[in-house]
Image: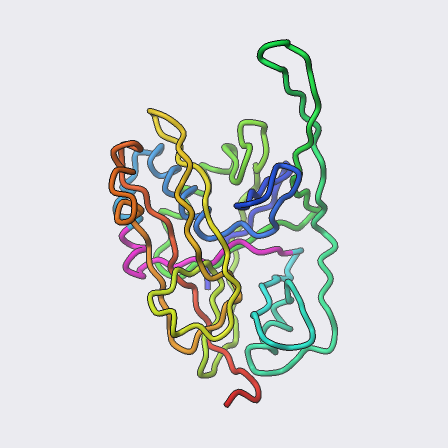
Amino acid sequence: MKVFKLHFKTPLRIGEAGIGLEKSGEILHSDTLFGAIANALSRLNEDVEEYINKVRYGELKFSSCFPFKENTYYLPAPHLPIEKKWKFLSLKNFEKVLSGEIPEEDDEIDFMEKVELPKVVLDRVTSNSGIYYLTAIKFAENSGLYFMVEGKHKMVRLALKYLQDEGIGGKRTWGLGKYELNEDETQIKDGGDYYVTLSLTYPKNLGSIVYWKPVVRGGWINTEKATLRKPKVIMASEGSVFKEAEEGEVLNLDIAYSDLSDFAGHDVFVNGRSFLLRMVIANET
């Protein structure tokens, strides 16, 4: 399985629906990654429609971005009704959970530090200055975020190389989210009658959900005409468990908001396709 590793040279800002600038997320979600790649391909005069269709029809799949340190990859803990609650598991412990075991030791993430960056704002009327703080994530040396890809990834690599100096995530105009790109390969041992997603998923069949955590996704649409707030969408978060191979879908927001493309000047898509692994749920009847 192809892995792209982002070694961040500057702090990373990950915004989430419902939180202000004083807080930051820890996962760069698959829908954000999808949009960043599409925007980069557009600036590079590549075929964005081809890229969107590859994702839409399952020819190209990618996970959300999760932490790594050196050669150790961490993954989101499946949302299971167990006493122990982890946020991330090392690949070794993640594979144990996929096989129905409960790891004895905890995995500590000590290489991601949330930092507060002071910013000055001027009142437009009085010109008085004030200070506010933006929270971002700073990574220790030899660490960062990674994601996994299935399918032909030439366009993904091209976009990621472009984004190295442009940045990814929020507040890129402030110099945040710049990284150095590296590539790797990995394998995950999976198997069983259930499925866990490593990306955000927009379920086609709500009856397929076994255990999940809903997450509200929003954000902004940057166009030549204006900056528009994206309509909110509820998805199943990474680590959600399904009893069927729930593929999810790429949403065209024009279906729900018929005039959105008129304002944006183009169709607006949100990636809700799954990145699934098989798993066992112990004692499930």
Residue 102 appears in view: yes
Please name the colour scheme applied to the rendered image. rainbow
List x then y, in percent, for residue 7.
Answer: 60, 45
Work out whether 246 lies above or below 178: below
* Res 3 visible: no
Q: Is residue 220 left or right of residue 47?
A: right
Q: Nearer the viewer, residue 259 or 32?
A: 259
- Please determine whether, in this image, residue 266 is positioned above or below residue 236: above
Number of marks present in the image shown: 0
Q: Nearer the viewer, residue 64 or 246?
A: 246
- The x and y percentages for residue 106 are 73, 69
Instruction: Say left or right for 206 vs 24.
Output: left
Observer-nearest of 73 and 112: 112
Q: Nearer the viewer, residue 145 or 208?
A: 208
> Please, which residue is most extreme toward the front here?
125
Q: Is residue 37 above or below residue 198?
A: above
Residue at figure coordinates x 42%, y 47% from the top left: 232
As drawn, the residue found furthest toward the top would be: 126
Percent of width and height locating residue 165: 52, 33
Residue 64 is covered by the magenta coloring: yes
The answer to whether residue 21 is magenta is: no
Q: Residue at x 36, y 63 (%)?
A: 248
State left or right for residue 84 relative to residue 166.
right
As displayed, is residue 194 above or below residue 240?
below
Which residue is found at the position 71% from the left and 24% from the top?
131
Q: Quadrant of residue 227?
A: top left
Percent of width and height locating residue 126: 63, 9
Point out the stretch of residues depicted in magenta.
53-68
Residue at horizontal 47 percent and vertical 37 percent from the top: 163
